[in-house]
Amino acid sequence: MHHDSSSRIAAELSAWIASAPDGARLPSSRALVKEYEASPVTVQKALSSLARRGLVESRPGVGTFVRRERTLAPPDLSWQTGTLGPQEFLPGPVAAPLREAGVDQFALHDGYPDPDLLPRALVRSALGRAARFEDSLRRAPVAGLPDLQAWFAAEVSDAGAASPPAPSDVTITPGSQTGIGSILRSLIGPGRPLIVESPTYWGLITAARRAGVTLVPVPSGPAGPDPEVVAEAIDRTGATAFYAQPNFTNPTGVHWSPQLRTAILEVIRSRRAFLVEDDWAHDFGIDDVSVPMIGDDADGHIVYVRSLTKSVSPAIRVAAVIARGPARDRIRADVQAESMYVSPLLQAAALDVITRPAWRTHVRGLGRRLGDRRDSLLSAIRAEVPALTVDHVPQGGLNLWCRLPEGTDVRSFVAEAAARGVFVTGGEELFPTEAHAPHVRLNFAGPNPAGYREAMHRLGEVMERSAGN
C-alpha cells in the first residue's frame, strides 16, 4: 500500500512530464487518487505544486495538461526612457562602504564593524523576547516607543549635560540616513546651502544630492574645522546650518577639543543657525569618550543624530534625531511622511539590548578591541607601506585616514588594490567637492585583523607599481 506525500507524487509526475510531449494530458485526479492510494487533498497539493512551477496548466472541466515553457520575446521597456525624461538625481556607483568583498579578500572598506565586534547573542535573545510581546506587533507611536525616547535623552543627560533634552524632543527613525534626509528636507530644502566639513561622511553627500541641497565645504584638518572659516562660509552663502561629526569624524577620526566645541557653538548661535551633530561613533571611543554637544545647547541650535545600527547590529535599523521647538516638529512631520513609524519589534529589541548590564560591559570591551585593531593596522602600514601617511591617529571611530603620495591616481590605486584582493575606500568619495590631496580610508574594524600585515604588503606592492609608472 502506498502512502506517498504530495511531494513524492509531484516528483514522480515531474519525471513523467519531462518525457511527455507538450499538451499531453495527465491522468485525472480520480485516477491519481486511485493509483497512489492518496487522498484527493494530497493529489491536489501535488498538482498545485506542478502548476506553480509552470509544468502543467489546468483547464476547468477538461483536465490538466503538460505545459512547456515558451520562449517569449524580451519585454520592450524602451518606452520608459521618453516617459521618465532626464534624471535629476544621479546616485553614481555603489559607495565603497556598501560593496561586498569575497572570501580570501581583505575588506578594509566596509562601513560596519565585523560581526565578531557586535553583541550578537544579546541581539538574538532580544529579538526572540520582543516577538513574544503583543505591543511589538502593533503600530508604534510616530515619535517612537516612549521608553526608547527616554533612553536616548538620558544618554545625553548622563554625559554631564547642562541643558539635557526631554524625551519628547526625541524622534526615532529607521536608521540615521532617514533622519539625515528628513533634517535636510525640513530644515534646509532644495537649492539651499549647507556648510559641511571636507572630507565628510559619504552618506551625507548622497542625502544632500537626493534632497537637492547645495554642499558648501570647509576644510577640516587634524584639529577639525577652523571656526573663522565656518563663520565666513555662513556669512558668504547665507547658510542656516552646519553638518559635522564632532566625535571621531568620519573619515578623519578627529575629536573636537572643548575649545573648538565652544567656538563653533558660538559661531552657530551668533548667526541664528543650526548645527547638525552626527554622533555616529558614540559607542566607538578608544582613548576618549563621545560627549554630545547638544547637552550644552538650551536654545535649540543643535539637531542631534545617533544610530544604533553600527554598534548593536545591522539588523537593528534604529536611530534617533533630537531637536527642540519648531525644528523638532518639522523633522518629525517629515519622518512620519517618509516612513510613518519605525517597526515596534526592532525598537523593542534595541531597547532590550541597550538596557541590559551586558551592553555596558560590551561597549567597554569594544573600545579595547578597537584599539588593538587600530594599533595593529598602524603597525602594518608603517612596516609595509611607509609611503602611506597617517597624519592623525584617531582616539575613536572605525577608520584610519591615510594620505597617498602627491600625484597618485586614487581611482587607479583603489582598482589595482581590489584586483589584488584588498578593498579600500578612495578618498574622492568622501569629499563634497574636489579632493585637495589623494587619500584612502581604511576601516580597522573589519574581518580578519590577523591579515592586516599581508593586506598592507599587497598595498605596498601597488604603491611601488604606481611610483614606477
Image (cartoon, rainbow, N blue to C red):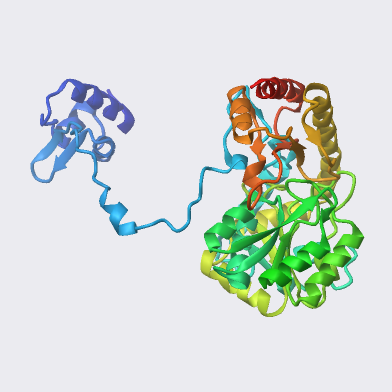
Where is residue 329? Give x, y as percent.
Answer: 64, 77
- Residue 157 visible (yes or no): no
Q: Is residue 230 above or below residue 51?
A: below
Q: Quadrant of the C terminus?
A: top right
Where is residue 276? Give x, y as percent.
Answer: 72, 64
- Number of numbered discs visible in the structure rendering: 0
Where is residue 135? Give x, y as percent.
Answer: 60, 63
| Nearer the observer, 113 or 85 | 85
* Residue at 77%, 25% in the rendered image: 385
On the image, which quarter does residue 325 sit in? bottom right
* Residue at 81%, 70% in the rendered image: 267
* Residue at 61%, 66% in the rendered image: 184
| Nearer the observer, 454 or 428 | 428
Q: Is residue 297 above or below residue 398?
A: below
Residue most extreme to the left: 62
Q: Is residue 190 left or right of residue 266?
A: left
Q: Is residue 210 left or right of residue 175?
A: left
On the image, which quarter does residue 346 sit in? bottom right
- Residue 138 visible (yes or no): yes
* Residue at 90%, 44% in the rendered image: 287
Q: Quadrant of the N terminus?
A: top left
Where is residue 399? Give x, y as percent.
Answer: 75, 41
